[in-house]
Structure formats: structure tokens, C-alpha cells
Image: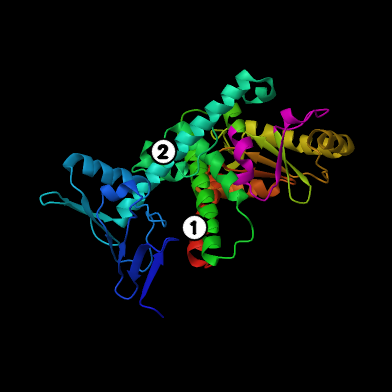
């Protein structure tokens, strides 16, 4: 294996020579290049085993930003430049002698070139679009181009994402755009990822995204529970939007407004993965759960909750009685085949904090178990279950290697 490599052009001019053992080298700018008037030969290379990026292989010197930067230095001092490019270290300039001694970090050079390339691409795209608009306005054959718009310029997103304090500067519109973009981007990634590390990055990103979203749902849920607002319609809207997360054993939600159902039916119904329907009735978190029978020292259902239980039982009866009609309505509206066989009813109402004594808790359990086909779900139980689910997924994510 040779210790050094060199490259010559068609005219046999030496363009560069690099010693791979000690990682030193020289780059020579050909006489035809205007840059040779600015930078002395050779350009010294320190820390490289191959020609670093930022140079023309044909001997025309520095590309993009490096060319502009050296020209600016020459214009200021009117001295040619002894240039060194280093793989490690800081950029330095000393103009006290006959020549300007200039050292440029390769990392700094790459950053400058990236910016310059972006500016060039943006300028080229702007000119291209203006030419298309001119053609569209001037010639009928190009009329479809009169309202031409600039395409995305590769590299712009990277520049944005590298900005300092990016997350702190995002506004609501930025966040909404990211929430739409990230799932679309992840779904576009090819499934045949050979690199295990890449696959892990994708899974970690998906898991992180899910956890962030669920944490936001939890935060919003807590905020609503802690507020004084006990409007039933607000809770119906909130739960209809997030019920598939809070009750994740279902696959589809059917709101009453989204299906032209004949007869009386509940606020919404949920369809499990097997196509069976369950009925949900939403009451407020402040809904009173129990009343005390002083004569027997037992608790019984509060009147409002008792009415809700009777209502859900009636919904279930009506759904089963008119199963064929209901299934047809759902199929027409949602293109979903469902099975309506003894739908189970669920009432989301009240909070466990209402059960202030052991007697109340025991009687609530007894009353719940006495219901035939209806379950009572408390708001804080619903929230606790979601929090436990998120915590469990976070633990599993830490413990389970890919």
C-alpha cells in the first residue's frame, strides 16, 4: 500500500498529493484559475488521508464559500494568502507579514459551503420560477405556468432544524404543522431498512411521538377535570375525540350525528376489533353517584345516575331489537359491517373522590356488580388507567432492546 496518493489532470499538472501515513498534503491551483492570483501554491492540508471536500478536483481551487471568503480577505489586505486547511483545530488569520497566513478549519469551511449552496439553490429556483411565469403569461402554450410556485429546495429543512433555541421559538402554527408533517414523514420511510440502528431510530421516534401525544391528552384531561366547567356537551366532545385512546380496546367510534340512525340512540357507540358494538353514555364529572338511605344506612344510586342506567339499558334493548336496521344504517354511512349482539352499556360519570368513606366504596362496588349489562366508569379511573398505560410503555421502552 502506497503511503502517498497524487492526482494529475489531463495536462499532467499535479493537482494534489497526500501522504496517508502522516495525513499531510498539498493542493495546487492551476495557472488558468483566477483564484491562483489570490491564494499561493500550494494549499497545505493537515489531518487528511484523502482530498477533503471544498476543493475542485480539476485544480480550480476552493469551491463556493471558500472562494468568496479568500477573495474578501485578499480585497481587504491586498496580499496573497498562504492557506492551510486543517481537519482539527480553529480557524486563524494573521495579516502582519508579506502574505496573509490563513488557517481554516474544515468544519468551518463545510458550514460556510452549506450556506452558500443553499443560497445558490434558492436563487436558481427563484429564477426558474420567474422564467416559467414569464412563459405562462407570454405564450398560450405555457399558460399553465403563469402561476408557477417555487418547489422545496433540498437542505432548507436541515438549516432550520440546526438553528439554536428552535423549540423555544415555535409558535402554535409551527407546532400544528410539525404534528401533521412527522406522521406523514414516518409513514413515507421505506419498510426495507437494512440498518438495525436506523430501524431503532424509527421505532424510538414513533414511541416518543406516541408518548408525547398521550401526555398531552393526559394534561388536557387533568386541566378539564380541575376546571370549574362541568358542561356535559363539552365532555361529550372531548371524550368522543379521545375515547379510542382512553378505551384502547376499540377500533372505531360512531357518533350519533355521523350516522342517520332511525330511533333513539346514545351519544356515541364504539366498535371493537371483532365488529361488535358497545353503547356509551356521557355524564358530567360532577354527577352525583350515591345517596344515603338513613333508615337502612345503605347507599343507593342518585336519581340522575339511576335515570342514566335506565336510559342505557333502553338503548341496548332498542339496538338489539332493531339490529338489522341499525347495522344497515351504519354500513351505509361508514361502510363498516357490525354485529349487534347484546351490546354492553357504559356510563362515564362522577369521580372516585366522591366515595369518601369505606361504606360508600363498598356499596358502590355492590351496586355496580348488581347491574346486569351496564358498567359505571369514573372519570378519575379513566385518567388513572391512561397514566398507568403511558408509564408502562415508557418502562417497556427502556427495558426492551430492539
- The structure residue drawn at horizontal position 32% and vertical position 59%, both measured from the top left corner, is 28
**Circle number at residue 144:** none
At which x and y percent is residue 365?
61, 49
Element carrying mark 1: helix
Q: Which class describes the residues within 10 Å of circle 2: few (<14), some (14-19), or many (20+)?
A: some
Q: Residue most toward the front?
A: 11
Q: Which one is earlier in the sequence, the residue at label 1 or at label 2?
A: 2
The quarter of the picture where the N terminus appears is: bottom left
- Number of on-image labels: 2
Residue 33 place in picture, x, y as percent:
35, 49
Q: Is residue 244 magenta?
A: yes
Can you identify the residue that label 2 sits on?
119
Q: Nearer the viewer, residue 87 or 33?
A: 33
Q: Nearer the viewer, residue 232 or 277?
A: 277
Which span is picked out in magenta?
238-267
| Quadrant containing the C terminus in the rendered view | bottom right
As for residue 253 lying within the magenta part, the answer is yes
Helix, strand or loop status at disc 2: helix
Could you tell whether 261 is left or right of 377 in the image? right
Contact, CB < 8 Å: mark 1 with mark 2?
no
Disc 1 from disc 2: Cα separation: 42 Å
Can the viewer see residue 225 in this picture?
Answer: no
Q: Is residue 52 left or right of residue 205?
A: left
Q: Nearer the viewer, residue 27 or 213?
A: 27
Q: Residues within 10 Å of mark 1 (few under 14, many from 20)?
A: some
Residue appearing at x 56%, y 61% in the figure = 199
x, y percent for residue 163 = 36, 43
Q: Residue at x 67, y 35 (%)?
A: 281
Residue 394's tag is 1
Amino acid at each position: 500500500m502506497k503511503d502517498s496518493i497524487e492526482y494529475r489532470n489531463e495536462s499532467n499538472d499535479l493537482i494534489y498529493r497526500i501522504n496517508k501515513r502522516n495525513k499531510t498534503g498539498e493542493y495546487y491551483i492551476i495557472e488558468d484559475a483566477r483564484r491562483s492570483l489570490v491564494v499561493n501554491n500550494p494549499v497545505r492540508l493537515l489531518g487528511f488521508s484523502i482530498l477533503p471536500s471544498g476543493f475542485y478536483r480539476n485544480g480550480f481551487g476552493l469551491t463556493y464559500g471558500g472562494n468568496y471568503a479568500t477573495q474578501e480577505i485578499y480585497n481587504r489586505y491586498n496580499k496573497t494568502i498562504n492557506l492551510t486547511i486543517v481537519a482539527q483545530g480553529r480557524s486563524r488569520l494573521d495579516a502582519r507579514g508579506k502574505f496573509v497566513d490563513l488557517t481554516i478549519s474544515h468544519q468551518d469551511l463545510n458550514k460556510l459551503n452549506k450556506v452558500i449552496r443553499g443560497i445558490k439553490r434558492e436563487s436558481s429556483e427563484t429564477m426558474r420560477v420567474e422564467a416559467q411565469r414569464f412563459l405562462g403569461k407570454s405564450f398560450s402554450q405555457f399558460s399553465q405556468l403563469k402561476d408557477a410556485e417555487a418547489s422545496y429546495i433540498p437542505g432548507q429543512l436541515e438549516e432550520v432544524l440546526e438553528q439554536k433555541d428552535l423549540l423555544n421559538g415555535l409558535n402554535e402554527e409551527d407546532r400544528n404543522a410539525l404534528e401533521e408533517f412527522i406522521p406523514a414523514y414516518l409513514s413515507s420511510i421505506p419498510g426495507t431498512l437494512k440498518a438495525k440502528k436506523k430501524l431503532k431510530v424509527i421505532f424510538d421516534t414513533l414511541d416518543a411521538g406516541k408518548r408525547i401525544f398521550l401526555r398531552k391528552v393526559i394534561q388536557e384531561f387533568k386541566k378539564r377535570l380541575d376546571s370549574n366547567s362541568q358542561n356535559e356537551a363539552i365532555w361529550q366532545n372531548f371524550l368522543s375525540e379521545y375515547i379510542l385512546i382512553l378505551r384502547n380496546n376499540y377500533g372505531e367510534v360512531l357518533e350519533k350525528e355521523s350516522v342517520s340512525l332511525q330511533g333513539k340512540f346514545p351519544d356515541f357507540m364504539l366498535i371493537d376489533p371483532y365488529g361488535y358494538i358497545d353503547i356509551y353514555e356521557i355524564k358530567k364529572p360532577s354527577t352525583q353517584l350515591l345517596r344515603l338511605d338513613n333508615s337502612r344506612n345503605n347507599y343507593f344510586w342518585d336519581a340522575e345516575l339511576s335515570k342514566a342506567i335506565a336510559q342505557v339499558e333502553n338503548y341496548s334493548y332498542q339496538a338489539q331489537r332493531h339490529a338489522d336496521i341499525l347495522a344497515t344504517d351504519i354500513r351505509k354511512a361508514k361502510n363498516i359491517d357490525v354485529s349487534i349482539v347484546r351490546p354492553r352499556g357504559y356510563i362515564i360519570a362522577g369521580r372516585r373522590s366522591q366515595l369518601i368513606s369505606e361504606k360508600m366504596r363498598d356499596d358502590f362496588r355492590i351496586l355496580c356488580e348488581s347491574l346486569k349489562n351496564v358498567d359505571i366508569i369514573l372519570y378519575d379511573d379513566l385518567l388513572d388507567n391512561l397514566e398507568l398505560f403511558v408509564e408502562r410503555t415508557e418502562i417497556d421502552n427502556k427495558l426492551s432492546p430492539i
